[in-house]
Structures are given as structure tokens and as C-alpha cells.
Image (cartoon, rainbow, N blue to C red):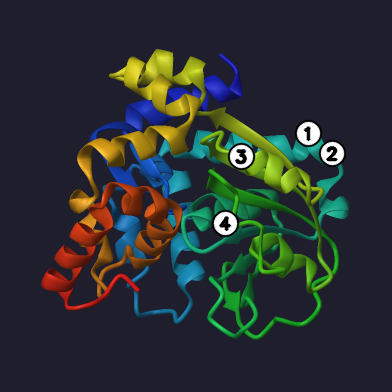
Amino acid sequence: MNDSDRIAKLLVQSGAYTDLESPVILASGQLGIYYINTEKLLRDNGAWKEALKDPSSPFLSEKLIAHSIKQAKEVPEFNQVIDILAGRIEEIYPEYRTELSFISGGETRDWIFSGPVANMLGLPHFSIYKQKKGEPHEINIVTHDGIEVSGLNENLYGRGVHVVDLITEGSSIYDNKSGVETGWVPALRARGADIGDLLAVVSRAQGGEARLAQQRVHIDSFVTIDDAFLETHSTNPRRALAYQTNPQQWSEEYLKEHGALDFVDAFNPEGGNIDRANKFLHRFRKTLTLTGDIHLLEEQVKRKYGVSLD
């Protein structure tokens, strides 16, 4: 069994891959009919979220990385995933201790994998935080002894490998809206870092590879959610394959038939999904306008949360 098959098997066994009865809004705003929750590979029943609430450190990545390293030591299945990721880096860079200066990962779920990989290889970890409006990305360094150091946002020289849990369209890694570059890769390059290799535990095969190839970033994905994977592991392969052929078209047809009222809760301004909801609205506003369902969605969101879609 090769590395890809091993991780695919662990995804299914841990419940990290799950078919859904009804679609949900993904981080990209696209609808999804299966979940890829790579964090379930930790086998910690969601304890990683509690690790982020630990008051002993002001740094999110330090807490999550410490928790993930602990799980890698205690859970053979998760350690196997980290060992595979680290092994691939050793294959790409046989002299990685002198060829590489860091391993990086973006907030939040990337750190579950990038942190332990850096620890296993004995390299510093660059923790990239989500960009706040009007401010540059914050990049902190987790040192060899596991302590996160803040304020290291000056030039970061040297070559590194970026590790992500999941890649879909790749917009969180690189985007260029209105001519402004954003994402993990521009954040590193803007500070002088050389970043041209990215490891992804899972790829949803939705265009991220092509987007990043244009930015001279090579992606090595261990599991691709493609026809072969879905035929083997989906509980409803016919529906999954229809979706996989063209997720945008499938989603538009679904919304034409079912409307968007099932997604009202995503527009709760106090909830954690408002960014996804905004991307969903941007992506499907035309479809919902043509069907007239945009008015129903507007009415329900205003009634439930007292806010306008605009």
C-alpha cells in the first residue's frame, strides 16, 4: 500500500471523509456534499478546539501545535500521517537541514499538520495568521523548543515548504482580487522567503493546483478526491461523481430546485460562518436572482437576524 492509499484509508476510518445528506457551504462559498475534516485524523474527539482556549499562552499556534505533537506521540495513525508528510520533504530535499530554513502553515487547521512536521524535521515553524483588514499578515515563529515568538515580522530569508490540511480552489493560499495579492504565499514572499513547494494532505481537485502553478508553486497532494476515490469510498457514488464533474453547475441546479432557505443560519452575523455566507452570496447571487429566491433569502435573514444581505 502506497502513502496515498494509507492516508485515504485513515481518512475514511477516522471519519475525516463523510458523505452528507444535504449540501453545506464550504469555505470557498461553494456548496459541498461531503465533508473533509482532516482534523479528525488527530483522533482526539475535538479536543484540538479546547487546546485553542488554553490560557497558558497568548498564541494560538503554539497551543495547537503542542497539542498536535502530543497526539502524534500518542496516536500511531496520526503519527503515520505526519511521518509520511515529513518523509516526502526529505525526498524532495535530501539535505533539508541545510537546504530548508522553515516549515510554514496557515491559521488554523494547517498547523495541526505543519507544526508536527516541523518538529519531526527539527526546523522552525512559521505560523501565518489570518490577515486583519488594512494590516499585513502576522507571521510568528515557533522555535525548536515549542515556544512561539511574536513580533518577527521583518524579512524572513531562506527557503521553506508550506503544509496545508486541504486545498480546494487555493484562494487562501494565493488570491489577486482587484490587483491586490493576498494569501499565505504572498505573505511569505513579501518578507523575502523563498516558497515554491506545498504539501497538501487532501486536494478536492477544484482548481487550486492550476491557480498556484501560475505562481510557481508546486503542489504535492497525498489524497485527491477524484472519481477513483469517490467510487471506492462514497456511500452515494452516483451523486458524488455528478457533483465532482462540475461542482458549480451541480450547485446551481440544486439551488434552482431547492432554493437557499436551508442556508439562512450561515448568515448569522454573530456566527462563525459569515465569511462563507458572503462568498456563497457572491458566487450564487445571479442564480438566486434569476429564480427569485434571493428575495426569500433576504426576507428570512432580515426576519431572523435583523440584517440585510447587503
The residue pinned by badge 1 equals 91
**Which badge, 4 or 3, comes first in the chain's sequence?**
4
Mark 1 residue type? Glu
Do the numbered discs 1 and 2 sit on residues whose CB atoms are within 8 Å?
Answer: yes
3D distance between C-alphas at marks 4 and 2: 20 Å
* Residue 52 vs residue 130, the one in the foreground: 130
The reply to whether residue 16 is visible in this rendering is: no
Quarter of the image with the C terminus is bottom left
* Residue 82 vs residue 104, the one in the foreground: 104
Q: In which image quadrant can residue 103 be found?
A: bottom right
3D distance between C-alphas at marks 4 and 3: 26 Å
3D distance between C-alphas at marks 4 and 1: 19 Å
The residue pinned by badge 2 equals 94
The residue pinned by badge 4 equals 115
Tell me the mark number nearer the camera, choosing from 3 and 1: 3
Secondary-structure class at tag 4: helix
Mark 3 residue type? Gly
Quarter of the image with the N terminus is top right
Q: Specify few, some or many for label 3: CA neighbours under 10 Å numbering under 14, 14-19, or 20 or more.
A: some
**Which badge, 3 or 1, comes first in the chain's sequence?**
1
Q: In which image quadrant can residue 157 be found?
A: bottom right
Mark 2 residue type? Pro
3D distance between C-alphas at marks 1 and 2: 6 Å
